[in-house]
């Protein structure tokens, strides 16, 4: 039995409800050791070798020598509801923007930079990374706030701030979907097994969505109508259009960070 455990493939998965269509079934498998955490934490574990594969921040593919498993991820077309900028009245006028952003995010911070420069024509903001709770508690100290995942779903609005869905901003800029998460790897060994496991898990969700919906309601205490809408916005099977959006993001990312 211990030998069997040693041979299990280590797979990280985003801990938010948007990954339940993968993680709920993956957790039942004996051939995979599943670790759930926020995307920024998963990327670190992938880079230090603690994990072989991870559904994590897509930006990891742009910033590190990692491979990707094709076909699966988490993307959004036009809106997502769970990646929000909350802009204070000073956001569009301040010459030195200060944004409080959750530590859990990497792709979203870089997407915010792209939108600031190319859509909203503001200065690139200074990002102060805090816990999600601290972002809300200290909101009045900043020109804007960035929340992702379940915390953003719980806060569609924050008093004194206007909410901007970053997936909607990306669509306004490019008319393309935005890929928030990909399945990345530091070693291709085991790729076929992970690919098959992801297909099996997602197929189960597609034929039995109520299982994930019920679990998400239990986990978040959010209304069923919101959960169902949210899952309808998440794109789990990535298409050529999604990868086109990813490539466009790579171009914007390179232009900004090479200049920096």
Image (tube, rainbow, N blue to C red):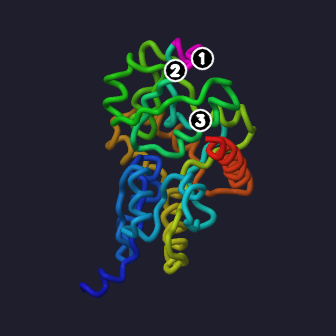
Q: Which residues are magenta?
A: 89-95
Q: Earlier in the sequence, mark 3 or mark 2?
A: 2
Pointer 3 with pointer 2, Cβ within 8 A: no
Q: Which residue is mark 2?
A: 87
Relative depth, front residue between 172 and 44: 44
Residue at the extreme left of the image, as rendered: 2
Pointer 2 with pointer 1, Cβ within 8 A: yes
Q: Earlier in the sequence, mark 2 or mark 1?
A: 2
Which residue sits at x=44%, y=57%?
43
The image shows residue 195, relative to residue 19, as above or below, that is below
Q: Dot 3: few (<14), some (14–19), or many (≥20) neighbours within 10 Å?
A: many
Q: Secondary structure at mark 1?
A: loop
* Quadrant occupied by the C terminus: top right
Q: In this image, 123 relative to 52: left or right? A: right
In the image, which is nearer the foreground, mark 3 or mark 2?
3
Q: Quadrant of residue 61?
A: bottom right
Whether residue 83 is visible? yes
Relative depth, front residue between 54 and 74: 54
Q: Dot 2: few (<14), some (14–19), or many (≥20) neighbours within 10 Å?
A: many
User: Where residue 91 sits in the image (x, y, percent)?
Assistant: 55, 18
Prevailing SS of the magenta stretch:
loop
| Distance CA(mark 2)–CA(mark 1) | 8 Å
């Amino acid at each position: 039995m211990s030998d069997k455990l040693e041979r299990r493939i280590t797979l990280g998965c985003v801990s938010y409800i948007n990954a339940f269509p993968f993680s709920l079934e993956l957790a039942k498998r004996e051939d995979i050791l599943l670790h759930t955490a926020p995307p920024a934490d998963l990327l670190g574990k992938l880079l230090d070798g603690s994990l072989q594969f991870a559904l994590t921040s897509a930006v990891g593919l742009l910033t590190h020598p990692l491979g990707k498993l094709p076909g699966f991820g988490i993307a959004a077309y036009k809106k997502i509801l769970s990646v929000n900028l909350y802009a204070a009245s000073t956001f569009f006028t301040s010459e030195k923007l200060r944004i409080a952003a959750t530590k859990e995010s990497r792709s979203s911070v870089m997407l915010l930079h792209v939108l600031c420069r190319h859509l909203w024509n503001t200065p690139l903001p200074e990002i102060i990374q805090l816990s999600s709770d601290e972002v809300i508690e200290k909101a009045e100290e900043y020109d804007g706030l960035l929340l992702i995942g379940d915390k953003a779903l719980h806060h569609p609005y924050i008093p004194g701030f206007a909410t901007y869905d970053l997936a909607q901003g990306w669509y306004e800029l490019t008319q393309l979907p935005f890929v928030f998460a990909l399945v990345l790897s530091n070693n291709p060994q085991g790729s076929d097994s992970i690919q098959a496991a992801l297909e099996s898990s997602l197929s189960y969700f597609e034929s039995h969505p109520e299982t994930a919906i019920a679990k998400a309601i239990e986990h978040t205490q959010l209304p069923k109508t919101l959960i169902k809408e949210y899952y309808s916005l998440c794109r789990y099977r990535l298409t050529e259009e999604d990868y086109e959006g990813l490539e466009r993001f790579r171009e914007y990312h390179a232009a900004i960070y090479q200049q920096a």
